[in-house]
């Protein structure tokens, strides 16, 4: 039988009966690649059209999909029967006539010995590395998919290096280590493997030179020192200590914990990037390199997988190890946080978006503004001025881009009804002027100032953004975006979405700054907005006591400002939580009061996205699913950059629509929009991942949660049970019964208003496996 051969790692190559295939269009290549990653799986045409042509009207996108499908069938017509099957609703690629290097790699990387060597040869680089950019939704999916393959490669190649060391094949170990560093140029485990391999080939000076290069790289790029294990290995090489450990797994290193908000950018080599542009890499709470990081880190490596085939499991079992025989090194010392978020891509290439969070309180300060000199009294809500971003490029031609980004950030921040945002025609009066933050704040009557700069070099762009509290002069937050650009408008949208998503909402940086100030004030001094952020923080504890306190704070916010729509939103959520978690003595009254507060919020401000969000929740629990879905749609229409709304919609999609994979994708996008999110995002991700049968991913998310609610505990217990980890499942069972002693499976399912019986049955199966009671029986 003839076979279609696809290579997707390192680029896209297709061969049919030994002959190279030329794709008629870029979209036809991307569609075939997407289907090939999950052969024999049916994909809805609606999903495919939205993924690849999301910038077009629905009917136009469907037409483009039909045309592209026709072109692919013509291209593959020599294969009988056709490998591309479908009907009016779905498409699938038949696996029996397909060989794909990505699938072969995922299978081989789970093994050892010859299988790992096969995986080493198959991994030629990032997934679809040379493909042109497509729709932003496809780029977001591709970013996460690439990261999943990188994680698998790094884990597997570390095991391969360990095996090569054990059999003293040091040249092969050196080649493996070099590929590890090519995948992640900041991976110290890879550097240690390479240093060891070189030293064991009697090139200790070369190994020490490599160590010094690593020191320089980490200092220059991340302003950190190498980890103690790396420094210890260098000392052992320098002192001539024996490097061959009695432990066959020793000396290669560990895998770091990977968080959902950390997605490493593709490698940019010195040959392809000017020296004034650099990647950024997180070093947040890394486990000691002397020990295995445990199941949380192993499963977290799979949590970033969001493609059509969610099976990135089978992480290799890792043993505790020592870098140098007979030598114990101290645990890792605390490091400065350097949050890294890769987000989005420009429309004609692979975009790397490195994000560095420099700390809640920056070391630099501005001269504080004076309340007495304010031209206008400060509003009760956070007031913000976005200054025109400075164009620092030697060529002024991209100046329009800096202005456009500034305008977009102003427009999108204005969608958050919590904020008072100064109009662009006022802030652009400062364009080209050397002004201080203090002066701007006093002249415009604002507390917060956002400023930034843009610099281009060839096809590279660097954008720096920072948020300053003008009253204290403190720099509260900063991010640096280093990227490659081909499509200006896609770049503009990606940057705006990221900046606004990080700053806006009650989980954003501006609200976070307000919360810190509110905690230190006496309650009689609080504004309506400050009461709101305190209420929200308390509500997110997800306890009956916290909810009562949140209701009291909401009422105080309303007393301060009876026209404050967001205070009624918060109050509606309090009644909603009372109902959903069984804390109310009168559930019917709680539902009525929640509906009243939600409708009041909408009546006060019909453009407030979160008012429609909570109204959607009330429609849901009152068994009006169509109205709930419509209200969620309205909320997303009003503010597509509100990460809270997107995350909650992802959570409730599990119950309302049953679209589990889409729910996971929505929550992950919310996390990318708001890396500083509360852990209820992780609760929702755990619930959605269980619904999508991605149990390892569910556990990885739920292990990060501080305050658990019944829903997240239920997903936790069910996920453990589905994985056969019964001891952990029983631990979660005990926690559930602490929260709700009369918990029953049927009662929980009924409370959550599952619209799809098969989804309800899936949760029932997991909860029954965990041993939870069903008192309806």
Image (cartoon, rainbow, N blue to C red):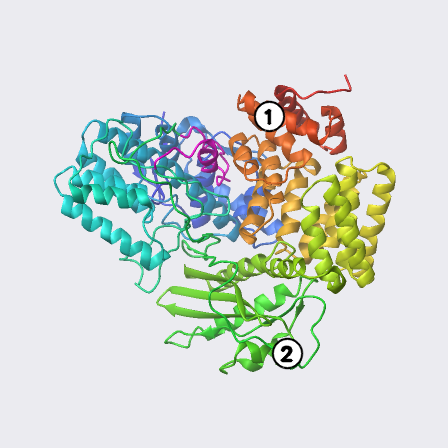
Image mark count: 2
Q: Position of residue 326 (x, y in %)?
A: 25, 31
Left or right: where 704 falls relative to 75: right
- For the question of whether residue 6 can be seen, the reply is no
First of labels 1, 2 by sequence position: 2
Choose between 675 and 618: the one closer to the eye.
Answer: 675
Residue at (83%, 58%) from the top-left corner? 603
Is residue 753 shown above or below 761? below
Answer with the quarter of the image where residue 160 lies.
Answer: top left
Q: Which residues are magenta?
A: 290-315
- For the question of whether residue 226 can be seen, the reply is yes
Secondary element at tag 1: helix
Secondary element at tag 2: helix
| Residue 405: assigned label | none
Specify the farthest residue to the top: 777
| Residue 731: assigned label | 1
Choose between 197 and 309: the one closer to the eye.
Answer: 197
**Majority secondary structure of magenta residues:** loop
Choose between 128 and 344: the one closer to the eye.
Answer: 344
Q: Is residue 565 magenta?
A: no
Answer with the quarter of the image where residue 317 lies.
Answer: top left
Answer with the quarter of the image where residue 509 lies.
Answer: bottom right
Q: CA distance from mark 1 to mark 2?
A: 56 Å
Task: Report which residue position mark 2 lands on.
Answer: 444
Q: Nearer the viewer's eye, disc 1 or disc 2?
A: 1
Q: Position of residue 615 (x, y in %)?
A: 77, 48
Specify the farthest residue to the left: 202
Crowd band around label 1 with a 10 angstrom C-alpha radius: few (<14), some (14–19), many (20+): some
Q: Is residue 298 magenta?
A: yes
Q: Position of residue 385 (x, y in %)?
A: 60, 72
Is residue 535 shown above or below 425? above
Residue at (51%, 33%) from the top-left corner? 92
């Amino acid at each position: 039988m003839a076979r279609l051969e696809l290579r997707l790692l390192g680029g896209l190559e297709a061969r049919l009966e030994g002959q190279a295939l030329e794709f008629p269009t870029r979209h036809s290549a991307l569609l075939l690649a997407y289907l090939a990653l999950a052969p024999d799986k049916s994909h809805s045409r609606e999903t495919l059209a939205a993924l690849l042509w999301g910038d077009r009207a629905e009917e136009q996108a469907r037409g483009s999909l039909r045309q592209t499908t026709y072109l692919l069938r013509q291209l593959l017509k020599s294969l009988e029967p056709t490998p591309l099957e479908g009907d009016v609703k779905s498409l699938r690629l038949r696996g029996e006539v397909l060989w794909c290097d990505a699938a072969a790699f995922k299978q081989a990387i789970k093994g050892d010995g010859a299988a790992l060597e096969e995986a080493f040869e198959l991994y030629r680089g990032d997934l679809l590395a040379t493909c042109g950019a497509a729709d932003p939704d496809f780029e977001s999916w591709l970013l996460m998919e690439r990261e999943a393959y990188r994680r698998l490669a790094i884990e597997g190649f570390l095991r391969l290096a360990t095996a090569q060391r054990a059999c003293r094949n040091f040249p092969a170990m050196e080649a493996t280590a070099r590929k590890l560093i090519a995948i992640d140029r900041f991976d110290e485990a890879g550097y240690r493997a390479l240093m060891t391999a070189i030293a064991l080939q009697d090139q200790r000076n070369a190994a020490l030179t490599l160590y010094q290069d690593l020191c320089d790289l980490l200092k220059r790029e991340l302003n950190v020192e190498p980890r103690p294990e790396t420094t210890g290995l260098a000392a052992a090489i320098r002192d001539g200590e024996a490097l061959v450990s009695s432990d066959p797994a020793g000396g290669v290193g560990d895998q770091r914990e990977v968080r959902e908000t950390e997605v490493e950018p593709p490698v940019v080599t010195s040959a392809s990037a000017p020296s004034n542009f650099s990647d950024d890499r997180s070093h947040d709470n890394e486990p000691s390199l002397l020990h295995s990081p445990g199941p949380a880190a192993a499963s977290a490596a799979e949590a970033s997988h969001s493609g059509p085939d969610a099976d990135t499991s089978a992480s290799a079992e890792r043993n505790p190890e020592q870098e140098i025989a007979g030598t114990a090194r101290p645990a890792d010392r605390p490091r400065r946080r350097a949050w890294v978020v890769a987000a989005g891509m420009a429309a004609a290439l692979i975009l790397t978006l490195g994000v560095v969070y420099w700390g809640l309180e920056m070391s630099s300060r501005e001269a504080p503004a004076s309340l007495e000199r304010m031209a206008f009294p400060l509003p009760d809500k956070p007031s913000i001025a976005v200054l025109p971003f400075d164009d620092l490029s030697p060529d002024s031609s991209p100046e329009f881009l800096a202005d456009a980004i500034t305008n977009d950030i102003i427009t999108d921040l204005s969608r958050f009804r919590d904020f008072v945002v100064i109009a662009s025609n006022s802030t652009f009066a400062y364009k080209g002027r050397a002004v201080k933050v203090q002066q701007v704040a006093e002249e415009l009557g604002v507390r917060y100032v956002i400023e930034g700069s843009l610099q281009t070099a060839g096809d590279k762009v660097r954008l720096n953004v920072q948020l300053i509290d003008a009253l204290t002069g403190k720099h509260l937050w900063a991010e640096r975006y280093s990227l490659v650009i081909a499509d200006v408008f896609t770049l503009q949208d990606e940057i705006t979405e990221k900046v606004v998503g990080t700053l806006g909402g009650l989980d954003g940086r501006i609200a976070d700054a307000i919360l810190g100030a509110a905690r230190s004030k006496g309650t009689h001094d609080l504004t309506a907005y400050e009461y709101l952020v305190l209420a929200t923080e308390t509500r997110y504890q997800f306890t009956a006591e916290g909810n009562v306190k949140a209701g009291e704070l909401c009422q105080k916010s309303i007393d301060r400002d009876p026209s404050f729509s967001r205070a009624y939103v918060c109050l509606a959520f309090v009644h909603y939580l009372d109902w959903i978690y069984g804390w109310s003595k009168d559930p019917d009254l709680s539902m009525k009061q929640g509906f009243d507060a939600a409708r009041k919020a909408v009546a006060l401000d019909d453009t407030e996205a979160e008012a429609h969000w909570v109204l959607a929740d009330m429609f849901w629990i009152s068994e009006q699913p169509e109205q709930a879905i419509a209200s969620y749609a309205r909320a997303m229409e009003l503010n597509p950059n509100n990460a809270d709304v997107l995350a909650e919609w992802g959570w409730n999609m599990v119950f309302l629509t049953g679209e589990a994979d889409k729910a996971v994708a929505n929550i992950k996008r919310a996390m990318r929009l708001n890396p500083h999110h509360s852990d209820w995002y992780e609760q929702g991700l755990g619930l959605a991942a269980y619904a999508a049968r991605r149990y390892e991913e569910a556990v990885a998310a739920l292990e990060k949660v501080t305050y658990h609610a019944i829903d997240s505990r239920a997903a936790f217990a069910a996920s453990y049970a589905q994985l056969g980890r019964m001891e952990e499942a029983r631990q979660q069972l005990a926690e559930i019964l602490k929260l709700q002693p009369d918990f029953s499976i049927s009662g929980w399912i009924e409370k959550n208003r599952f619209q799809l019986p098969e989804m309800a049955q899936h949760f029932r199966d997991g909860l029954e496996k965990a041993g939870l009671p069903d008192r309806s029986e």
